[in-house]
Image (tube, rainbow, N blue to C red):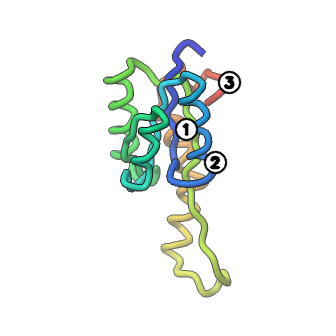
Amino acid sequence: MSSRTVLITGCSTGIGRACAVRLARAGHAVYATARRTESIEDLREAGCRILALDVTDEASMRAAVEAVEADAGAVGALVNNAGYSQSGALESLPIDDLRASAASRMTSPRRSRRRSPPSARRSACA
């Protein structure tokens, strides 16, 4: 990987948060993202840079990648982690909620990979 800059989606909890902390401690320039940045402000203490990113919003994805490129020159790796689930019986869940959940897990990673620079798409880590 030519750039040690990593953009990680979905850092508010779980795997995304753990990846952000571990990669920052390993010396990578980590851009941790979440829809609500207040949920990841504490990641600054681990050395992460914080960005707002909603993977279901094309303009938000574009702005995050452009911010990383402006600050670091390039995105070296992209970790597509964002997503959320719906709980309950399938027939009881509003269809718009199901569509949004599916988009966050299925189509958004494709769009954010296409939005990332070719160097990140070629990387084994992306």
Q: Which mark is residue 45?
A: none
Judge whether residue 118 can be spotted in this image.
no
Residue 1 rendering spot, x and y as whole percentages? 60, 16
Q: Residue at x 56, y 38 (%)?
A: 21
* Residue that protrudes farthest toward the top in the picture: 2
Residue under numbered circle 1: 20
How many C-alpha atoms fall within 10 Å of the one at disc 1: few (<14), some, or many (≥20)?
many
Residue 67 rendering spot, x and y as whole percentages? 33, 31
In which quadrant of the rendered view does residue 89 lie? Answer: bottom right
Q: Which mark is residue 124?
A: 3
> Looking at the image, is mark 3 or mark 1 earlier in the sequence?
1
3D distance between C-alphas at marks 3 and 1: 17 Å
* Residue type pointed to by label 1: Ala
User: Is there CB contact under 8 Å for labels 3 and 1?
Assistant: no
Judge whether residue 16 can be spotted in this image.
yes
How many C-alpha atoms fall within 10 Å of the one at disc 2: few (<14), some, or many (≥20)?
few
Q: Which mark is residue 15?
A: 2
Residue 42 rendering spot, x and y as whole percentages? 43, 47
* Residue type pointed to by label 3: Ala
Callout 3: helix, strand or loop?
A: loop
Q: Check the image and report above or below for 17 versus 67.
A: below
